[in-house]
Image: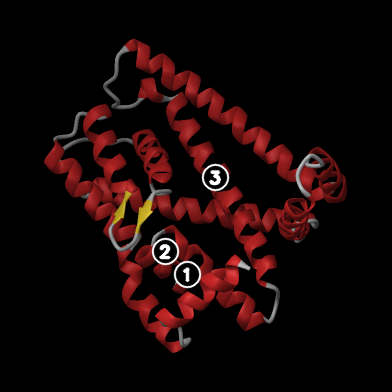
């Protein structure tokens, strides 16, 4: 909750807060928690791509109002997303099974770099592989996939309920929600401190340009979606942050430590 609150208030630089707090409370290296954060983002990307690809591949059976050329682009794009998801998943499994081989091959390919740069990159690669090795067991891997899937089911349910609350202004099916979620998920990568930004802009554009929703209604949907999925955590997250002794001075220290 504190980590998500930090992302909402500080933008994407706030991502460092949660790994830092876990490393302090559990007395483990910060680099190991950063590696776990990378793994988490890989699983999130995989599920976002899968949802996006599923929606785009079924664009013809949805309420999307686009011409034949754009429909063809969506279908091809959906297929490409599925292929990319499969490649990412295969790479993740290979990394889990053969981390040392991957490290050796990657370092050999970076032999042209100066020694000091290679040393820094090697530390980053080793930290990442340590995180990947945490999923060496089949049970751990299945749990990670299961929790990620449950997380995205909850997100989809949230989007679906927000869209359903506008029943009467426009009609959205489940596939439309997947398409909408896919675009907004990638738009959320641009997270401006305190105000969001990327997801609201993408949400309005997608609803208006693709689904022909009036700008006023599209703006309302975007704001309510942002408030529901981001802002609602702030009261609890801020109280918990104060309870943990987290303040602006400690946030500055987190930034300095993560840069080392």
User: Quarter holding the C terminus?
Assistant: bottom right
Residue carrying label 3:
45
Query: Does residue 166 appear in this view?
Result: no
Q: How many marks?
A: 3
Which label sits on residue 7? 2
Q: Nearer the viewer, mark 2 or mark 3?
A: 2
Look at the picture and state if 227 lies above or below 189: below
**The quadrant where residue 73 appears:** top left
Residue carrying label 1:
3
**The quadrant where residue 80 appears:** top right
Colour scheme in the image? Answer: secondary structure
Lateral position of residue 42 relative to residue 236, left or right: right
Whole-angstrom CA distance, mark 2 to mark 1, is 6 Å
- For label 1, the SS is helix
Of the numbered discs 3 and 1, the one sitting upstream in the chain is: 1
- For label 3, the SS is helix
Which label sits on residue 148? none
Residue visible at 80% across and 57% down in the picture: 137
Between 10 and 151, the one lying in front of the other is 10
Lateral position of residue 4 relative to residue 215, left or right: right
User: Quarter holding the N terminus?
Assistant: bottom left
Residue 183: horizontal and vertical position, in percent?
38, 38
Lateral position of residue 129 relative to residue 152, left or right: right
Residue 185: horizontal and vertical position, in percent?
42, 45
């Amino acid at each position: 909750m504190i980590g998500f609150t930090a992302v909402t208030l500080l933008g994407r630089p706030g991502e460092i807060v949660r790994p830092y707090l876990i490393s302090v409370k559990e007395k483990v290296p910060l680099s190991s928690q950063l590696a776990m954060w990378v793994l988490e983002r890989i699983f999130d990307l995989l599920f976002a791509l899968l949802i996006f690809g599923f929606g785009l591949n079924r664009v013809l059976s949805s309420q999307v109002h686009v011409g034949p050329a754009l429909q063809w682009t969506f279908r091809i794009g959906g297929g490409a997303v599925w292929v990319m998801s499969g490649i990412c998943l295969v790479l993740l499994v290979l990394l889990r099974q053969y981390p040392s081989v991957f490290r050796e091959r990657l370092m050999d390919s970076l032999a042209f770099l100066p020694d000091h740069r290679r040393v820094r990159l090697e530390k980053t690669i080793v930290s990442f592989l340590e995180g990947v090795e945490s999923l060496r067991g089949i049970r751990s891997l299945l749990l990670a996939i299961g929790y990620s899937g449950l997380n995205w089911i909850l997100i989809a349910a949230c989007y679906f309920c927000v869209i359903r609350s506008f029943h009467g202004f426009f009609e959205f099916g489940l596939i439309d929600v997947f398409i909408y979620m896919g675009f907004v998920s990638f738009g959320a990568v641009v997270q401006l401190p305190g105000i969001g930004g990327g997801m609201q802009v993408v949400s309005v554009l997608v609803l208006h340009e693709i689904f022909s929703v009036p700008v006023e209604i599209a703006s309302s949907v975007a704001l309510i979606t942002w408030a529901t999925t981001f802002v609602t955590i702030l009261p609890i997250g801020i109280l918990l942050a104060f309870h943990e002794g987290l303040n602006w001075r400690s946030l500055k220290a987190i930034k300095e430590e993560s840069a080392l």
